[in-house]
Image (spheres, grey):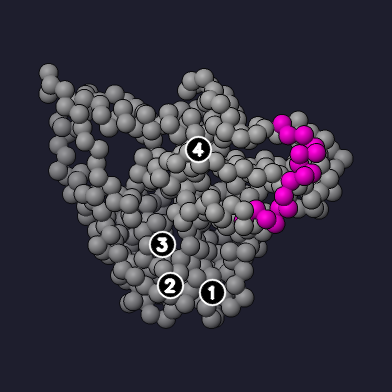
Amino acid sequence: MSLVAETPRAMCVRCRRPASVCYCRALPRIDTATRVVILQHPRERDMPIGTARMASLCLPQAELHIGVRWVSDALARSLADPARPAILLYPGPGARDILREPPHGPVTLVVVDGTWSQARTVVRDNPVLQALPRYAFTAPEPSHYRIRREPRAEYVSTIEALMHVLGVLEGDPARFRSLLDPLYAMVDAQLACQASASRRSLRQVRRARPRLPRIPDAITARFADLVCVVGEANAWPYRGPRRSARTRAGHDELVHWVAHRISTGETFELILAPERPLSPSTTFHIELPDDTLHRGAPRSSLAARFSPFSRPGDLFCAWGHHGLDLAVAAGLAPAERLDLRADAHRLAHRKLGSLEAYAATLGPPPPPLAAGRAGRRLALLVQVIHAWRAIAAAASAAPDAA
């Protein structure tokens, strides 16, 4: 018996694939008059053979947003280009065939990336998407995505759908065929790896290594970009006498925003004065007194005050989407996000309770990093990240039996 520590695989920071199967050399750069907005379900983000990121790397004018529910105002701003009105590529009643009846003039093409069940959830939970003109199409050729099975033969991957649709919208189908080059490269490399791995060696690896949870790649590969964030709201109960007034007013409003950059230990905190009547339960839940909230900064100042702390490429780590959506509604620029609650659910293979309950399974609570409940929860998010990094390190260093 010999113990040999396994060296972690080198990863490409651009395509986020192992260096041995990196497809970056095959990526074309295709400028478009069409503005492409890709809305990716968070569970699709960690799929190693997904094509949404691949498409965003090929199309400089494309935007890739990860989430399930977006604050309507924030998503609406992303789609509000009067020179390029938004359309939704999603099948359903009333959808026009975009290959036969393409819209006239430049458009903003909204594409939902995920399984069909995930895509239905994204469209269902975002009214701004439901209001868009809807288009669909039947693929004129079989999918080239040989490493992933589609539910029906005529379905295609996200990058293949963009190849077909952009070719029609821009009147030059041949120019967009090169979008398939990185897909071919990824598929060929994946199939080659599968063919070279013998069944015997796979059984040896499974016996030798402990079955540790698969931690999201970003926890290790993008450690310098990780920023834990918590947003607290002035929120009226969803049931009660103030419900109708609250609905007319719009959404809950952000009153406390905290962030911590794990790699440097920097912490940002800003208390924002409520602009609407304060819910009687707000101070109890967020653990800040009324007078502290009312002395807070204007909500309109959030983006300017947070700007010196933020960096390009930041990856916001939060427990769910609500606090981040509130921050975007308050003027913070949308950023790439990692939903630790969704990842914890996937790792635990069961329904989870609160952040506090999950963090208690990892060890004693750390000291708070800011005031109120947000400060305590921020420290718990950092605790989760450190615990997951330790699991990932243990998985990569697990000994093999000889």
Task: Please give the residue where the numbered disc 3 appears in the rendered image.
Answer: 56
The residue at which mark 1 appears reads as: 107
Cα–Cα span, label 3 and label 4: 24 Å
Closer to the chain start, of discs 4 and 2, is 2
Q: Nearer the viewer, mark 4 or mark 2?
A: 4
* Disc 1 versus disc 4: nearer the observer: 4
Residue 337: x, y in percent?
Answer: 50, 48
Q: Which residue bears the numbered disc 4?
A: 340
**Badge 4 amino acid:** Leu
User: Circle 3: is it few (<14), some (14-19), or many (20+) Cα within 10 Å?
Assistant: some
Quadrant of the image occupied by residue 285: top right
Question: Please, what is the three-letter code of the amino acid marked with disc 1?
Answer: Val
Q: Are marks 1 and 3 in contact (CB under 8 Å)?
A: no
* Numbered label attached to residue 166: 2
Q: Nearer the viewer, residue 246 or 176?
A: 246
Look at the numbered disc 4 and give the secondary structure of its residue.
Answer: helix
How crowded pointer 1 is (Cα within 10 Å; few <14, some 14-19, many 20+) is rated as many
Gap between marks 4 and 2, in whole Å?
34 Å
| Secondary structure category for the residue under label 1 | loop
Locate residue 402, reporting x and y percent. 12, 23
Which segment is the magenta one?
287-303
